């Protein structure tokens, strides 16, 4: 019999989310598990959006600055996609305008962060001066994710622009080595999760990503406690098009691992830290990450039928 997250363990996780997580994760939990209203999620996103249409204010917990960034804006659009937002959804059109305004026509890419990240505590990897080198010229992260969201909501985006950006992103993926850096891979998965991609292009990219997943995720359970890409970070349900890339027994072991690593307070902890930079700021970010990860793991366990009684 497969291991299950017990009802008591689920209740502890739910209590953590209701009492310790941000209002955003609380609203998302209610939406996913308690028939909560989509409008509550939208209301919880409002404080993170700036007048320029972009998102900041610590939506990505490792960046505490108020300033907008492309990466935080794609995170917001990912949340809007999850709750079935349309082009008419409040806040969404302005976010697309922000992304278009921050496109670098010379490189054909988007800078992942803005200089404003330096205005507040942040993880060392979010250093603006070194960001282009740290994120490999932004060729995939954040470009692939941005292109996916622009395509999904393309009624609001100039057609030649988004079509050209999609072709360029797809061409780069199909010519890339099978092994991919984890964040680049996740951004391309965001892209293929986009509704309405041209069928042949979607199939070619998905086939390539299956090969990349098979060579890029960590399949050794002994390594899952470190900062690496676990199978369930790319395969969120049994229906995932990428599921065939990972052996079923590895997915089952990863589900067992999630159940076994829940903390006593019901949460799951991040596998990284930057308390050596700013202990107080990290303490706030770490608590927020626990909310993000706890919600994510509950959704995954639920999708695989690993929560007792659900």
Image (cartoon, rainbow, N blue to C red):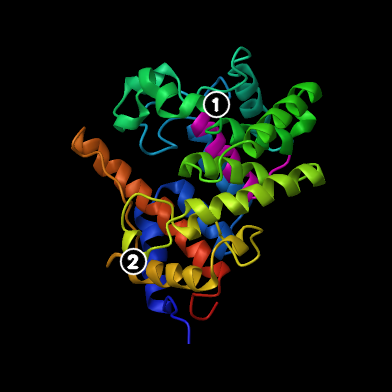
Instruction: Reply yes or no: does residue 99 show up in magenta.
Output: no
- Badge 2 or badge 1: first in the primary sequence: 1
Quick check: 82 above or below 113?
Answer: below
Is 262 situated left or right of 307 in this image? left
Per the model, the C-alpha gap separating discs 2 and 1 is 34 Å
Q: Main secondary structure of the magenta part?
A: helix
Which residue is farthest bottom?
1
- Depth check, front residue: 99 or 129: 129
Is 35 situated left or right of 55 in this image? right
Measuring from the top left, give residue 93's x and y in whole percent. Answer: 68, 29
Q: Residue at x 25, y 36 (%)?
A: 281
- Depth check, front residue: 202 or 119: 202
Is 271 situated left or right of 7 in this image? left
User: Where on the picture, by quarter, is residue 122?
Assistant: top left
Measuring from the top left, give residue 16's x and y in whole percent. Answer: 36, 60
- Classed neighbour count for the residue bearing mark 2: other residues with Cα under 10 Å, few (<14), some (14–19), many (≥20): some
- Depth check, front residue: 101 or 198: 198
Q: Residue at x 41, y 54 (%)?
A: 293
Which residue is farthest top?
106
Quick check: 220 above or below 137?
Answer: below
Measuring from the top left, give residue 95's x and y in whole percent. Answer: 61, 28
Residue 84 in view (yes/no): no
Q: Residue at x 61, y 35 (%)?
A: 144
Q: Secondary structure at mark 1?
A: loop
Q: Residue at x 54, y 71 (%)?
A: 248
Residue under label 2: 262
Residue 243 in view (yes/no): yes
Q: Tags 2 and 1 in contact by the CB under 8 Å rule?
A: no
Quick check: 278 above or below 67?
Answer: below
Range shown magenta:
70-86
Q: Which mark, residue 36? A: none
Residue under label 1: 54
């Amino acid at each position: 019999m497969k291991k299950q997250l017990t009802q008591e363990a689920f209740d502890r996780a739910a209590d953590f989310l209701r009492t310790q997580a941000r209002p955003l994760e609380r609203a998302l939990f209610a939406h996913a598990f308690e028939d909560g209203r989509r409008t509550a999620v939208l209301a919880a996103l409002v404080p993170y959006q700036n007048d320029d249409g972009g998102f900041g204010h610590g939506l990505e917990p490792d960046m505490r600055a108020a300033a907008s960034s492309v990466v935080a804006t794609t995170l917001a659009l990912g949340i809007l996609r999850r709750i079935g937002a349309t082009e008419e959804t409040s806040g969404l059109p302005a976010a697309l305008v922000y992304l278009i305004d921050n496109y670098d026509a010379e490189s054909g890419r988007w800078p992942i962060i803005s200089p404003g990240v330096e205005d507040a505590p942040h993880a060392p990897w979010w250093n603006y001066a070194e960001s282009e080198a740290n994120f490999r010229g932004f060729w995939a992260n954040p470009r692939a994710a941005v292109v996916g969201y622009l395509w999904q909501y393309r009624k609001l985006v100039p057609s030649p622009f988004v079509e050209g950006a999609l072709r360029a992103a797809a061409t780069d993926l199909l010519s890339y080595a099978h092994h991919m850096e984890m964040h680049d891979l996740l951004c391309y998965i965001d892209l293929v999760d986009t509704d309405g991609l041209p069928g042949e292009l979607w199939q070619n990219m998905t086939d390539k990503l299956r090969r990349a997943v098979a060579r890029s995720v960590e399949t050794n359970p002994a390594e899952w406690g470190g900062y690496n890409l676990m199978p369930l970070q790319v395969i969120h349900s049994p229906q995932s098009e990428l599921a065939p890339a990972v052996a079923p027994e590895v997915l089952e072991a990863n589900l067992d691992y999630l159940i076994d690593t829940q903390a006593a307070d019901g949460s799951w902890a991040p596998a990284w830290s930057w308390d050596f930079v700013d202990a107080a700021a990290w303490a706030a970010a770490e608590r927020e990450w626990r909310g993000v990860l706890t919600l994510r793991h509950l959704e995954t366990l639920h999708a695989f039928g690993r929560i007792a009684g659900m």
